[in-house]
Image (cartoon, helix red, strand yellow):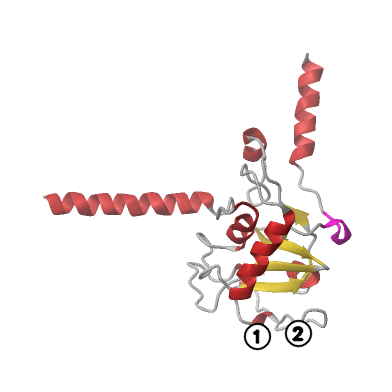
């Protein structure tokens, strides 16, 4: 009985490990991510095939409540346009962008490993797993529908203004896969923001009554 429990725990722990995926193993419609800033956050996108990714970046309006995480702690060097996809971070129209895999996984001068985001994770597994790597949401869209959604949002840059907490790259990728904007990385902060706002509104109503 004890050994059976241990085996189940070990199996669960193995399932909780987020594995690196090779570019050649990616399939169109995959929700992928890579780590940035020494692993403090993850950047997400949708693989659309032929070595390209559609992902969501800070918009020109810069409505985030924090500075860009990628710029924290060091002066960012301006790299020349990518010879593969012509992407150049400093000189493009921000928002929903289409880049090659190398530009997606580039963090400064380093190329980070690619990883696949998991859907339908059981509650226990979700609670024990690092945020930004999985969700309990189920995806019902077919791969071509995911790609079509990503392409459409890229075509009209139709995902609104970037917000680190409420409208980021993980929101974009989960929306393409499920039709729901969700970010497990920032869900707790977003929840606290909503509760503070509700408390303020309740207090204002109470003061008006008095």
Q: Which residues are magenta?
A: 21-26
* Image mark for residue 91: 1
Is the residue 8 above or below the residue 68 in the image?
A: above
Place residue 152 in its image quadrant: bottom right
Q: CA distance from mark 1 to mark 2?
A: 9 Å
Assess disc 1: are there few (<14), some (14-19) or many (≥20) residues with their C-alpha within 10 Å of its C-alpha.
Answer: few
Place residue 88 in its image quadrant: bottom right
Place residue 60 in its image quadrant: bottom right
Residue most toward the left?
210
Residue at 79 percent across and 30 percent down: it is: 10
Residue 116 placement (x, y as % from top left): 75, 53
Residue at 78 percent across and 79 percent down: it is: 85
Look at the image and tell me in which quarter the N terminus lies: top right
Q: Nearer the viewer, residue 181 or 18?
A: 181
Assess disc 2: are there few (<14), some (14-19) or many (≥20) residues with their C-alpha within 10 Å of its C-alpha.
Answer: some
Residue 123 placement (x, y as % from top left): 62, 35
* Image mark for residue 144: none
Q: Nearer the viewer, residue 24 or 88?
A: 24
Answer yes or no: is residue 163 visible.
Answer: yes
Name the residue beneath numbered marker 2.
81
Would you say 45 lies left or right of 52 here?
Answer: left
Marks 1,2: beta carbons within 8 A:
yes
Is the residue 163 above or below the residue 15 in the image?
A: below
Secondary structure of residue under mark 1: helix
Q: Nearer the viewer, residue 6 or 118?
A: 118
Is the residue 14 above or below the residue 169 in the image?
A: above
Residue 112 placement (x, y as % from top left): 78, 63
Residue most toward the right?
24
Q: Is residue 80 magenta?
A: no
Would you say 26 lies left or right of 174 here?
Answer: right
């Amino acid at each position: 009985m004890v050994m059976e429990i241990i085996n189940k725990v070990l199996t669960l722990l193995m399932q909780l490990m987020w594995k690196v995926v090779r570019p050649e193993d990616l399939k169109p419609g995959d929700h992928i991510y890579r780590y940035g800033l020494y692993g403090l956050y993850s950047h997400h996108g949708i693989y659309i095939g032929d070595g390209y990714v559609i992902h969501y970046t800070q918009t020109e309006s810069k409505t985030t409540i924090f500075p860009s995480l990628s710029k924290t702690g060091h002066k960012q060097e301006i790299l020349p346009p990518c010879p593969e996809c012509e992407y150049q971070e400093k000189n493009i129209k921000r928002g929903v962008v289409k880049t090659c895999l190398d530009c997606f996984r580039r963090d400064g001068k380093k190329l980070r490993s690619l990883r696949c985001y998991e859907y339908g994770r059981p509650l226990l597994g979700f609670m024990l797993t690092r945020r930004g790597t999985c969700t309990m949401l189920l995806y019902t869209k077919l791969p071509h529908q995911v790609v079509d959604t990503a392409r459409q949002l890229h075509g009209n840059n139709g995902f609104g203004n970037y917000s680190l907490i409420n409208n980021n790259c993980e929101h974009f990728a989960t929306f393409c896969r499920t039709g729901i904007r969700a970010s497990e990385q920032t869900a707790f902060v977003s929840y606290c923001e909503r509760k503070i706002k509700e408390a303020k509104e309740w207090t204002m109503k109470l003061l008006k009554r008095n």
